[in-house]
Image: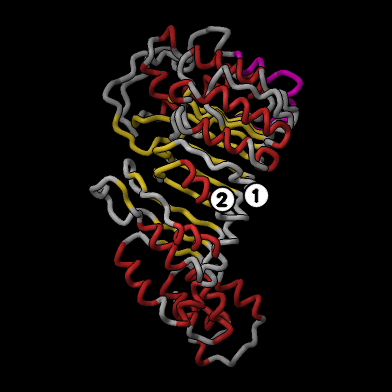
Amino acid sequence: MPLSRLLGKLIGRKSVREAPVIPLPPEIVDYIISFVDDRKTLRSCAVVCRGWLPASRYKLFHRIVISKGAKFKSLQRLIRSPSMLQCLAVVEELRVPCFTKTAPKGQLFKPPFIEVIQLLAVHLVGLRSMRIQFHYGCWLAPLEETFLTSLSYLSRLVELDMDHIQFSAFSDFQRFVCSFPQLASLSMASVCWNVSDSLAGAGANLRLESLRVGSMNGSYLPPLLEWLICTPCCRTTKSFHCQDQYFYDGAPAPIVNRWLRTLGEHLEHLTIPLSSEIDLSRNVDLLSLVVPTHIVTVWGWEMASEMLCGVRSSKLAELTLSLQLWVIYALPQEEGLWQDDPSVDGVDQVLMQERFESLRTVTVCLETSFIVPRQYYICAQHELQTRMRHVHSRGILRVTHSPMEKCIPAPFLMPEHVCRHCRGAPSRMEPE
């Protein structure tokens, strides 16, 4: 329903034009417009009167996504208009993904986000969040001084998200990140560099509160953490999320431990792959712990128990573990989840200890890359409630399930399904 007709109904007239002018407080008008998401309606609101313009303009332009080259060319023309410059002043979020689905040909590239930032930076005085993306396998050309200079205008940026950005050198990455004096949250997925050089003294004013890394193998994570240890980040970082399922190449574990020990009591939220080498003894104020590694075999549960034994925080309130469901059923019964082996119940025994009394939620996330019958989810939930009986009796156990991004129908009926709740193999069911 058009906004004008809606307001007309509220005051008993067919339209706003037939109704007497009701002087609503500006705060109420802004609050109503904040719920409008349709861009056509927002454009109509923007031309009703001057009082409606600020809130409508903010909703229209507080977040802009430049996803195509055609949009960027249109923006280049519109930026010459003074009214457009006023719109850019309210932008708080900027997203610049790849302009093309396929990677360009060549060796060194100047990605679209560099041109976008150089053009708009001087006008984005209120920008607080930026997400940039490029193609995997495409190395960036060395960053030019003109581009680095333009970053100085983004002095209010607090959140930076980079996806598939491959710098020509680690020093370029350092200079890019250190260009934002108020940066508090840094997220990196498949970010790497060709030359592992380092700038002396870089990052003296860098004070991250949240660091999120993913898809970084053993050759890229160590230099990143070694650098951050030498910056004020080691005293300001409260959240560290390493979202890889495994420590690739096994190399990062020592430097990750050094990073965790340096953070010490400052660390409150942690996401870390399953590993018996991780030392959490210094993180005594940890509030939440997420282990994204898929715990599949008894061996995985043993490692999870060992890892939790190293937790020394008496403030831990949230614990999340991941379980890859279809692999469990595909495994031989003697290696699966349902074997009556004490190591499977080890997590439950560890969580009975006094230091885990502060736990408010223990979440086991069932993940699957196959479309499996609902019965398997139900049986997995029942089995977990039985095996983690002490946690379940406290009323803090949550079992959730979510499919991965790409799911295919299970190519087999998993005959190893012999959980105690079904008393034998279930009848064949169609995948949901």
Q: Position of residue 145 (x, y in %)?
A: 46, 58
Q: Position of residue 308 (x, y in %)?
A: 63, 20
Q: Position of residue 394 (x, y in %)?
A: 69, 26
Q: Give the structural element (helix, strand or loop) at label 1.
A: loop
Using the numbered discs, state the Cα–Cα distance from disc 2 to disc 1 in whole angstroms. 8 Å
Q: Quadrant of residue 190?
A: top left
Vertical placement of 394 versus 50: above or below? above
Locate the N terminus and report the quarter of the image it occupies. bottom left
Q: Position of residue 409 (x, y in %)?
A: 29, 31
Q: Amino acid at mark 1?
A: Asn
The answer to whether one can see residue 148 in this image is yes
Q: Amino acid at mark 2?
A: Cys
The residue carrying mark 1 is: 205
Structural crowding at the residue carrying mark 2, measured as other residues with C-alpha within 10 Å and reported as few (<14), some (14–19) or many (≥20): many
Q: In the rendered structure, which segment of residues is drawn in magenta?
A: 346-364
Q: Quadrant of residue 317?
A: top right
Vertical placement of 109 versus 394: above or below? below
The answer to the question of whether label 2 and label 1 lie on touching residues, with beta carbons closer than 8 A, is yes
The answer to whether one can see residue 317 in this image is no
The residue carrying mark 2 is: 178
Q: Give the structural element (helix, strand or loop) at label 2.
A: loop
Furthest residue to the left?
105
Count of numbered marks? 2
Residue sitting at x 33%, y 18%: 414
Q: Nearer the viewer, residue 63 or 204?
A: 204
Q: Is residue 359 magenta?
A: yes
Q: Is residue 282 magenta?
A: no
Residue sitting at x 55%, y 61%: 152
Q: Nearer the viewer, residue 346 or 395?
A: 346
Locate the C terminus and report the quarter of the image it occupies. top left
